């Protein structure tokens, strides 16, 4: 079993780095804090550039995390339990976390120009919902996600990393203003589809011949903004029991993405098969 250095000195430079990165008031993110095993692992898989990974002295370092860090020469050190409590100012200290360089921000067009369906969240500001949509988008083969007026300053926001379980780094995600979103949707070649309870067909009934789609979702209470709504080409419905007012945006997005997943994942599987031939 591999052994790691244990930090017990509050004056260690690594400790001060953790304290600085964990501050909630930071606006410019050059380095980020990634907490807990799955977000750390998914961020490593997503190619995030880690400076150092830490584990509590009482917690084992997961084997896959240790292997990736060894391959990429990312240092791993252990943090004394009492010191970890002091650093995080709470008993809810992560057992595993890492300090990484913030990935370069993507432009909305860089996501929208990719092959595959793109999810556009318009005015969705609850980070838990955004994180859930990002996970579904990755799971069901979407090309990326564009967040419009989300209130986030960066996709590397500590809350979003946690809510998405690190998958925010596993597919392209970009921030956009409503003006940028309107221009992007209006000028792009893909059809723009919004969910509407009165629509006659479901997302899965839209023919694959329609090509790649932009699936747009507004906040549950306010719906789509005028800018985004003006670009909608088609509407589709999710059948629900009578008397059901609406679905949570992350649930609605998950259903729509699943309805398109056979096309998305089928193309992905075919591409992988061709690449390995």
Image (spheres, grey):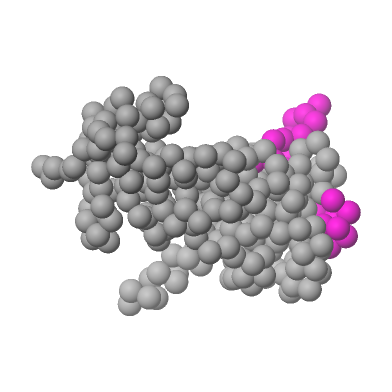
Quick one: which residue is furthest to the front in this view?
Answer: 11
Classify residue 177 as left or right of residue 268: right
Image quarter hosting the C terminus: bottom left
208 magenta-colored: no
Asked whether residue 262 appears in the rendered view, the answer is no
- Residue at 40% in and 69% down: 272
Above or below: residue 95 compared with residue 231: above
Front-most of 164 and 150?
Answer: 150
In-front residue for pair 134/24: 24
Q: Position of residue 219 (x, y in %)?
A: 76, 42
Residue 167 x, y percent position in the rendering? 48, 50
Name the residue located 52 percent from the left edge and 39 percent from the top edge.
23
Seen as rendered, the residue at the extreme top is 91
Q: In this view, does 49 lie to the left or right of 146?
A: left
Query: Which image quarter is the N terminus in?
Result: top left
Looking at this view, name the residue that lies furthest to the left.
1
Magenta segment: does it hold 235?
yes
Quarter of the image for residue 248 reads: top right
Q: Position of residue 111 (x, y in %)?
A: 61, 66
Range shown magenta: 225-250
Report the number of discs. 0
Residue lying at 67% horizontally and 65% vertically, measured from the top left: 108
Towards the viewer: 268 or 88: 88
């Amino acid at each position: 079993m591999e052994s790691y250095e244990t930090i017990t000195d509050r004056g260690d430079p690594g400790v001060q780095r953790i304290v600085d990165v964990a501050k909630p008031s930071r606006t410019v993110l050059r380095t980020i804090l990634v907490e807990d095993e799955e977000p750390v692992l998914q961020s490593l898989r997503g190619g995030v550039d880690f400076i150092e990974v830490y584990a509590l002295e009482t917690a084992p370092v997961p084997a896959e995390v240790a292997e990736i860090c060894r391959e990429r020469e990312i240092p791993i050190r252990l943090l004394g339990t009492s010191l970890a409590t002091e650093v995080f100012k709470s008993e809810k200290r992560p057992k595993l976390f890492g300090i990484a360089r913030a990935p370069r921000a993507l432009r909305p067009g860089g996501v929208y120009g990719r092959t595959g369906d793109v999810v556009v969240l318009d005015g969705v500001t609850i980070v838990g919902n955004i994180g859930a949509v990002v996970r579904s988008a990755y799971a069901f083969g979407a090309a990326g996600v564009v967040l419009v007026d989300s209130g986030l300053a960066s996709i590397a926001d500590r809350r979003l990393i946690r809510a998405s379980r690190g998958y925010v780094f596993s597919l392209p995600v970009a921030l956009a203003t409503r003006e940028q979103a309107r221009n992007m949707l209006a000028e792009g070649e893909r059809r723009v589809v919004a969910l509407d309870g009165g629509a006659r067909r479901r997302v899965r009934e839209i023919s694959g011949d329609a090509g790649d789609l932009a699936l747009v979702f507004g906040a549950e209470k306010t719906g789509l903004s005028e800018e985004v709504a003006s670009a909608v080409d088609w509407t589709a419905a999710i059948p629900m029991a009578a008397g059901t007012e609406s679905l949570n945006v992350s649930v609605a997005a998950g259903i729509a993405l699943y309805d398109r997943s056979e096309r998305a994942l089928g193309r992905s599987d075919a591409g992988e098969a061709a690449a390995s031939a």
